Image: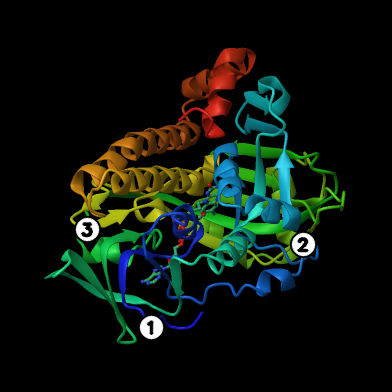
Amino acid sequence: MAVAQLTEFDIVIAGAGMVGASLACLLADTPLRIALIDRLPLTPASSSEEHELSSDKFDPRVSAISQASQQLFRDIGVWDGIAAKRACNYQAMEVWDAEGTGSISFSATQISEPELGSIVENSIITAMLHNRIAQLENVTAISLFSIESFESIEDERGSRIEINASEGQSIRAGLVVAADGANSKLRQLANFECREWDYEQHALVTTVRTEREHLNTARQRFLETGPLAFLPLRVAQHDDDQHFCSIVWSMLPEQAERMQALSEAEFNTELAAALEFKLGAIKWSDKRFVFPLRQRHAIDYVKDNIVLVGDAAHTIHPLAGQGVNLGLLDVRALAEELTGGIQAGRSIADSVVLARYQRRRKGNNLSMMWLMEGFKRLFAQQDLGIRWLRNMGMNAADKMMPVKNQMVRKAMGLDN
Ligand SMILES: Cc1cc2nc3c(=O)[nH]c(=O)nc-3n(C[C@H](O)[C@H](O)[C@H](O)COP(=O)(O)OP(=O)(O)OC[C@H]3O[C@@H](n4cnc5c(N)ncnc54)[C@H](O)[C@@H]3O)c2cc1C
């Protein structure tokens, strides 16, 4: 997209990833003039048409999209396009402990839903969002704009923020939404305080072809060194091949280094064994990528005219596939509060409006983060007594339908 001529906006959304781009779409029917900026080129409208959906060209980054997130994508008119491209609905989930006999399973039929969620490649979601943005009159997309600095200024329109790019461009707005991801430059420049710590785990991700069919089931085995997830993939809309999975394998950093150095055949053998051959042998695996995992949560989401959303506000262990789902709940809440504020005649960066957004989201995000931290610590325990209790607890929870149903509804974003 070309550099915008217009440099004055009501809102600048910094970061056109899944979260920032969704916010721009949610604000499409407002009178607000919005700039959506990103340091990278936005996926051109045509490239999603060209997106090759061959079986060995899966994006290694995928997300388990909850029902609440699907509904948001439906509301902004992109879900049908995503589902038509490539989304794998999964109807069941199996979770088990590598150290013992504890296991728990969830199924969509138990809660009278058609599916538990969908596994979708991140690049398909962003391509569809960027296509939609190209159709919106009140959104100006500005790519290759890498945030370098910002300053708070007072002009004839009140208090505003000027953002400067490394290429010398500047834009101004009354409100800046930082959706620039886990290492948010804006969060750092504006000195938002965070609580953060290293999980001391790295996530290895890749795509694999398995001997047995995945049967639209997500699987997760908790190993002492971290969880291993097999997420079912779909090759194309009318293709029943159920042999492809995306894997997210959290492990110690030195183990990740070793795994990355293995030959494909060696890696496939270790991976199949780590899943206890539930899907048979691994027949093929793609290039491996490694991401360091870090827990981070901003103490405040709002400071003057800047507001944090998505990974800029919080990053969470991928073990329950909740990261982007939480970010989408953030922007749903922020869009509702901003729209309500405008209708009530309030200014765009009104402190009451922004405080309401923070109140709606912070506690919810925090409780999900603590839950994931608890799981991670619980499964890292080697004490025999704790292991026994853990296995007993899992098996007991598996038999308690109301507890299980509540857990799954929460994960699907249905009870927030
Ligand atoms: C291994 C792994 C597996 C995961 N699996 C799941 C899952 O199954 N389900 C789930 O819900 N979540 C999952 N997550 C989390 C999910 O990927 C993130 O929560 C999500 O991508 C965050 O989206 P975002 O839009 O907030 O940030 P990002 O996707 O990071 O987007 C940020 C955007 O800002 C831009 N940007 C950054 N810096 C600048 C700058 N200085 N100037 C201009 N632009 C800038 C970037 O180019 C990018 O487009 C997983 C994460 C990992 C690591």
Judge the density around disc 1: few (<14), some (14-19), many (≥20) Cα neighbours within 10 Å. Answer: few
Q: Which residue is mark 3?
A: 305
Describe the element under mark 1 as helix, strand or loop.
Answer: loop
> Rounded to the nearest whole Å, what is the CA distance between mark 2 and mark 1?
53 Å
Mark earlier in primary sequence (2, 1): 1
Residue at image coords 74%, 50%: 233
Circles 2 and 1: CB distance less than 8 Å? Answer: no
Q: Of the residues tagged 2 and 1, which is closer to the observer?
A: 1
- Residue 265's disc is 2
Q: Quadrant of the C terminus?
A: top left
Q: Which residue is mark 1?
A: 5
List x then y, in percent, for residue 29: 46, 54
* Between 42 and 93, the one nearer to me in the picture: 42
Judge the density around disc 2: few (<14), some (14-19), many (≥20) Cα neighbours within 10 Å. Answer: few
List x then y, in percent, for residue 89: 72, 42
Is residue 151 visible in the rendered image? The answer is yes
Q: Amino acid at mark 2?
A: Ala
> Rounded to the nearest whole Å, what is the CA distance between mark 1 and mark 3?
23 Å
Q: Of the residues tagged 1 and 3, which is closer to the observer?
A: 1
Location of residue 174 (image quadrant):
bottom left
Q: Amino acid at mark 3?
A: Asn
Describe the element under mark 2 as helix, strand or loop.
Answer: helix
Is residue 226 visible in the rendered image? The answer is no
Would residue 250 be found to the left or right of residue 268 on screen?
left
Q: Amino acid at mark 1?
A: Gln
